[in-house]
Amino acid sequence: MARCEVFDPEEVAIAHVYTRVCRRCFLLGDDPVSGKNFDHRKVWIEEYLQQFAAYFGIDLVGFAILSNHFHLILRSRPDVVATWTDEEVARRWLMLCPHRRQADGSPMTPTQPEIQSIAGCPIKREVIRKRLSSFSWWMRLLCQRVAMRANREDEQTGRFIQDRYHDAFSGRSLVAGLCCLRRPESNSGGDGRNPRGQ
């Protein structure tokens, strides 16, 4: 079944998504063959998750990163994205997919002409508005960035991640995922409580 038939892009949805690496690659832990440790890759993924949670209209409910795969519990918020101004949509997208970067690779603040290139074009603006609450775009950018960085580090080319992601649709899968996944500090206020008091 196509993802667009499972998740209505206009409705709030919760999903347990996961993906795994290929080529006997590692996301963290020790490779017994090469003797290398890859724990630093977990830090990369956590940094991307924080960035994405800040700019996408998607809540990161929980996550788990293992040696060869990771799980995420995500909640799409098209209702929130619909309240953003055209300029806010453009700014958020340009922070995720910047035209210009700092020397350290972080995105530069978008200029007004860059913002207007999206905000001033109704077709582009609406496509990007939908992308900002799309699980598929979240996972596309996440997997792409992790793969490019890991391939560069390993001096490899080609696939690093098997597929963009898989969905675990059943209610049991979602509950099991919630039980074993780590709640991000940004969502829990750092003290284990929900910042909204719920």
Image: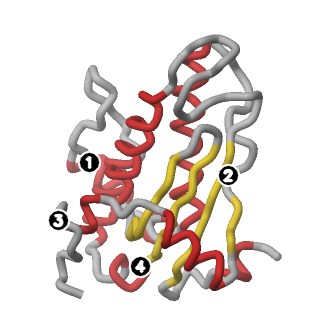
Task: Locate residue 171: give its quadrant.
Answer: bottom right
Question: Depth-wise, is mark 1 or mark 2 nearer the camera?
Answer: 2
Asked if the residues shown at circle 3 and circle 4 are in contact, with their CB atoms under 8 angstroms apart, the answer is no
Q: Position of residue 48 (x, y in %)?
A: 40, 45
- What element does badge 4 sit on? loop
3 or 2: tag closer to the N-terminus: 2
Mark 4: amino acid: Arg
Mark 2: amino acid: Arg
4 or 1: tag closer to the N-terminus: 4
Name the residue at 71% across, 73% down: 3
Q: On the image, numbered disc 3 is attached to which residue? A: 191
Tell me how far mark 4 sits from mark 1, CA to CA: 28 Å
Q: On the image, numbered disc 2 is attached to which residue? A: 164
- What element does badge 1 sit on? helix
Tell me how far mark 4 sits from mark 2, CA to CA: 21 Å
Tell me how far mark 3 sits from mark 2, CA to CA: 32 Å
Q: On the image, numbered disc 4 is attached to which residue? A: 77
- What element does badge 3 sit on? loop
Mark 3: amino acid: Asp
In this rendering, the answer to whether 174 lies above or below 148 is below
Name the residue at 53% across, 30% down: 29
Question: Label 3: few (<14), some or many (≥20) within 10 Å?
Answer: few
4 or 2: tag closer to the N-terminus: 4
**Residue placed furthest toward the right:** 1
3 or 1: tag closer to the N-terminus: 1
Colouring rule applied to residues: secondary structure
Q: Nearer the viewer, residue 181 or 106?
A: 181
In this rendering, the answer to whether 148 lies above or below 11 is above
Q: On the image, numbered disc 1 is attached to which residue? A: 113
